[in-house]
């Protein structure tokens, strides 16, 4: 299995971790970034998915 990745909002710094998902947003743990709907927005600032960048933790 591939390692889970982490993405950061370039606008506000919100972190999305594939391993943890976002259960409050109905995104199950283990949900890959590419499987998140394209119209999803940052829960903190409303930025679009393209405003996120993969980061190394």
Image (spheres, grey):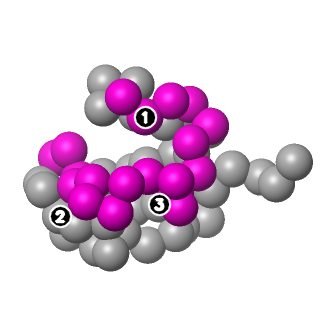
Q: Secondary structure at mark 2?
A: loop
The stretch in magenta equals 26-44
State the image coordinates of residue 15 (x, y, percent, origin top left). 39, 51
Question: Which residue appears at 87% of the width and 48% of the height?
Answer: 1
For mark 3, does the 10 Å Cα neighbourhood hold few (<14), some (14 to 19), or many (20 or more) residues? many
The residue beneath circle 3 is 7
| Magenta span contains residue 4 | no
The residue beneath circle 1 is 27
Question: Which residue appears at 54% of the width and 67% of the height?
Answer: 55
- Separation of disc 2 and disc 3 at Cα? 13 Å
In which quadrant of the rendered view does residue 20 lie? top right
Query: In this rendering, would 44 be left or right of 9?
Result: left
| Magenta span contains residue 27 | yes
Query: Along the line of sight, which residue is nearer the eye, 34 or 10?
Result: 34
Q: Earlier in the sequence, mark 1 or mark 2?
A: 1
Question: Which residue appears at 20% of the width and 44% of the height?
Answer: 43
- Separation of disc 1 and disc 3 at Cα? 14 Å
In which quadrant of the rendered view does residue 38 lie? bottom left
């Amino acid at each position: 299995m591939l390692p889970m990745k982490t993405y950061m909002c370039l606008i506000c710094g919100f972190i999305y971790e594939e391993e943890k998902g976002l259960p409050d947003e109905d995104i199950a743990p283990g949900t890959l970034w590419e499987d998140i709907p394209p119209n999803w927005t940052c829960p903190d600032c409303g930025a679009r998915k393209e405003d996120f960048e993969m980061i190394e933790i």
